[in-house]
Amino acid sequence: MSINEVMRERKRPNSGPLMGRRKGLRITLLVAAALSIPSHAFLTPTPTTPTTPSTRLQMIGNIFGGGSESKEPQLPKDVKDAISKCRGAVQKGLEDRISRMDVEMPVGADYGVENKKSKNKRGNLSSLAKDNEQQEGLTMEKLDTSNRELARLFVEMFQPLGGEHIAAVFNDEYLAEQARQKWSNDISTECNIVAIDRKGKRGIIKTGKKGQKKKAKGFAAKMADEMEEDNSASGPFNLPKDTEVAMFVSPGPKELIAIERICNEGGKGTCVILLNARLSLIEKYASDDARKLFTEEFEPVWSLSAAPQLESPGCLMHRAYPGQWVLARKPMVGPPKTIALKEGGGKFSGDECKEAYSQIEVSELEKGTEKLAENMAGWFK
């Protein structure tokens, strides 16, 4: 079914089988069209294996050798490949009717979305974490840019739904306003851009022309503006009406409280995606129900992050739904090597990383010269 056929089905109020299907199936069909995946492949639900609480850590032997016939999970080769594989993992999650997804990319990753002057359009994953000579240190601005670029990629992914059905949710109004300005006049980023904290402006951006004097307002006009602002910022946060996909951008513990309420009130009808929530770093949740929601119900459909460095220097953890968790390391020479796989449960624990790392042979030279930033900068070169 082409995207045009799907859109015609949406316009006919009482025709076609799609109108009687669940909202989750509609999202699957539309995103499948966007990714050029035949929609008929998703009309019949695919049987899934129930998740078991037990986990299995599998050590990989001969990590410095091996042939090309390996069926081990493949780590992304470059930025373009990482985004493509991430989209594929999200699509598979939609196919399996998963409406609670967690996506995690490296801290401060550079996707080159807003930097149009970049000559390296494909890039390798060294551009996800720039090398030391180019990287002046992670700043709040760089983190905000990275998170905003990731959100933009996801907004573009879900465009077939229509912008009125997509919500990009930022933590405060300052971040939301930045996105509005960066994404303005771009039809590929049509969506509702909203903020959980509508009063948190952090010095809202001014859009007037340089040197232009601000027009004086009378007392009545000022009062009207303040009342309008108070009304818009009052009450608990709610998603815009008719939202079918909500992407929460880098939410923290405070924002998770609002997200929990949204999930409870909206049920499974709205697909909720967490972008760089870093759930594994959250030590305390607001309640046991919140902990269960974010640690059990949200599926880590895509994750690419640093492993505990004390236990496994220079290693990364990766997972693409529905595959296994991968612990991998890049030696000084050659491509990255998978050193352990894990089925079920969450990320590798510190003890699991230590156990896996102790099984590999690392030269004294590598031990003395490796640094995490340098390792990530050279990843997949």
Image: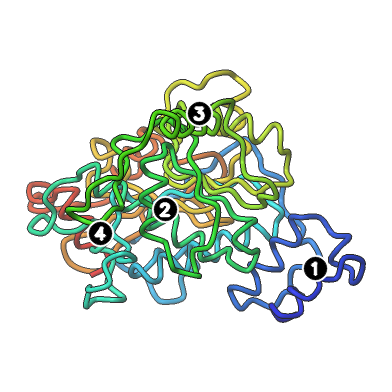
Crowdedness near tag 3: few (<14), some (14–19) or many (≥20) residues, C-alpha within 10 Å = few
Residue 252 vs residue 49: left or right? left
Name the amino acid type tagged 2. Answer: His
The secondary element bearing badge 1 is classed as loop
Relative height, residue 42 to residue 59 (above, below): below
Q: Earlier in the sequence, mark 1 or mark 3?
A: 1
Amino acid at circle 4: Lys
The kind of secondary structure element at disc 2 is strand
Numbered label attached to residue 227? 3
Left or right of 131? Residue 298 is: right
- Residue extending furthest toward the right: 14
Relative to 305, residue 331 above or below: below
Q: What residue lies at 63% left-to-right and 45% top-to-bottom?
A: 240
Q: Which mark is residue 43?
A: 1
The residue to which callout 2 is attached is 318
Where residue 300 appears, x then y in whole percent? 53, 47
Q: Position of residue 170 (x, y in %)?
A: 45, 42
Residue matched to label 4:
330
Contact between marks 2 and 1 (CB within 8 A): the answer is no
Mark 4 or mark 2: name the one nearer the start of the chain.
2
**In the rendering, at what x and y percent does residue 250 appear?**
42, 42
Q: CA distance from mark 2 to mark 1?
A: 29 Å
Residue at the (50%, 70%) spot, across then down: 187
User: Which kind of residue does numbered mark 1 sit on?
Assistant: Leu
Q: Residues within 10 Å of mark 4 (few under 14, many from 20)?
A: some
